Amino acid sequence: MTPTNAAIDPRFEISRIDRRIFGGFVEHLGRHIYDGIHEPGHPAADADGFRADVVELVRELGVSTIRYPGGNFVSGYRWEDGVGPHDERPRRLDLAWHSTETNEVGLHEFARWLELVGSDLMLAVNLGTRGTQEAIDLLEYVNSDADTSWTRQRAANGRRDPFAVRMWCLGNEMDGPWQLGHRNADDYGKLASRTAKAMRMLDPDIELVVCGSSGSGMPTFGSWERTVLEHTFDDVDFISCHSYYQERFGNAQEFLASGVDMSRFIASVVSIADAVAATKKSDKRIMISFDEWNVWYLHNDEGGQDDKPREPGWPVAPRLLEDRYSALDAVVFGDLLITLLQHSDRVRSASLAQLVNVIAPVMTEPGGPAWRQTTFHPFSLTSRLAGERAISVPVLSGSFESERFGTVPNVNAVATVDDAGATLFVVNRSTGDGEDLRIDVSALAAAGAGVSVIESHLLHDDDRYAANTLDEPERVGVVPVPGISVEDGVLSLSLPPISWAAVRLG
Ligand code: AHR
């Protein structure tokens, strides 16, 4: 009999999984809000202008917490513009995305949309063009139950009870020179610490996320985290990580190593946070909020960026960042989710950037349909099938040589367990080799009971660049894993090159 080459054993527990790891991100950007989730003239729109077909897809996606309203947008945003009577709301320039913000949708409308999709709100404050006072004004408006001018205003705007928002980001990507109000690590660290202290005086129950680097490739990566945490260690609960991946120069094999990059990024930030803890003689552990991650074709092969509207002037809801995702992108994306779960002991929150139309799993056409991109499938399946605890899954597989990471295993896997069973999430990163897995699952069997496959899903396409489009919205999907079986405590399955799978075991 062929020996096993992997094992799922609940004794190799990584951590309890915080469901906030399956979070999302909605920014006022392009057609995300306007002509995306909100399109009053659309046949599927409700009385508030929210498209029911989009709501349904976002529910199916299974997003826990949603970060709002940016992103780069938040660094120039005046939250007061988005509350109160609609005819009094100003139209403003959005400098981050060279667009016009109508403020038709603001805090109250977005909170109502979140009730429809069943997700929790995570808010970011503007520490770009604004500061501590505006942040505590917003917190008072959102969370306070005292009788004040702000809370009276909230009630007059239709919300008597506090919104009770628990997670707050102290600005966005403040290390990035493109950010409005960009600062060095010292200046940002001091501002973030002051603001965090003030916010906690108002509401001690909130959880705070301080900005880490906008990517591990930033010139200040590492020193930024250390300096910012030296200022804010006692004030915050999380430090953020942001990372986007894309295939470059037609090198799919290198792109398929993206999970290794994400894993090293997380490990580095954890080390820096724990080193700061050591210098402070503290047992406190700063957690990671990986609050922007995705595949994003940001750079063209000449090194340029394509992230400003093509239309002249300052358009409302231009088509921006509307990436079309392929089967290959979805496999890389599935591996990024596996990586987040492998680090669930420290990654306690993550936000898929973004949700609708803008680098998104859900696409819409104005007046037309909404559909699932390829990346929709790994996200919705991981969110639905992941159990309570993450388990590490050692695998012996083939490997490939990466320019950046050396020898990289073809197969990467993680499992989760709960009282009803286990789920395996697994990827074959090889562009050329299939992988046959024989996984020892005997440790999952309760006394006398066998292990069986309840459901299985394989994402693979012989055309790695196949995508779902307006004309062909269901071109790429998932199918049950062909030939999967469990016999004598061994789960057998074959993964074609460039594939991702989820297997639920009972
Ligand atoms: O998600 C798109 C943009 O990427 C966000 O606005 C910004 O935070 C990041 O650079």
Image (cartoon, rainbow, N blue to C red):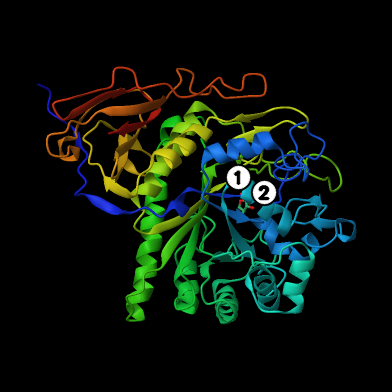
Question: In the displayed structure, does residue 183 sit left or right of residue 341?
Answer: right
| Residue 189, horizontal then vertical, whole percent | 54, 75
**Quarter of the figure with residue 230:** bottom left
The quarter of the image holding the C terminus is top left
| Residue 325, horizontal then vertical, whole percent | 56, 31
Determine the secondary structure under disc 2. helix
Q: What label sits on residue 130 in the rendered view?
A: none
| Residue 356, horizontal then vertical, whole percent | 64, 40
Reading the image, the residue beneath label 1 is 117
Is residue 301 at least partly visible in the picture?
no
**Residue sitting at x 60%, y 41%:** 299
**Quarter of the figure with residue 441:** top left
Q: What label sits on residue 113 in the rendered view?
A: 2
**Residue sitting at x 36%, y 75%:** 277
**Could you say which is closer to the camera, residue 64 or residue 134?**
64
The quarter of the image holding the N terminus is top left
Label 1 residue near ligand 1, CB within 8 Å: no
| Above-or-below relation of 54 to 176 | above
| Three-letter amino acid code at the position of disc 1 | Val
Determine the secondary structure under disc 1. helix
**Residue sitting at x 32%, y 37%:** 423
| Residue 328, horizontal then vertical, whole percent | 48, 29
Question: In the displayed structure, does residue 297 sit left or right of residue 342?
Answer: right
Label 2 residue near ligand 1, CB within 8 Å: no
Is residue 148 at least partly visible in the picture?
yes
Question: In the displayed structure, does residue 176 sit left or right of residue 347?
Answer: right
Task: Assess whether mark 1 and mark 2 are in contact (beta carbons under 8 angstroms).
Answer: yes
| Three-letter amino acid code at the position of disc 2 | Trp
**Residue sitting at x 74%, y 51%:** 97
Question: In the displayed structure, does residue 422 sit left or right of residue 66?
Answer: left
| Above-or-below relation of 212 to 422 | below
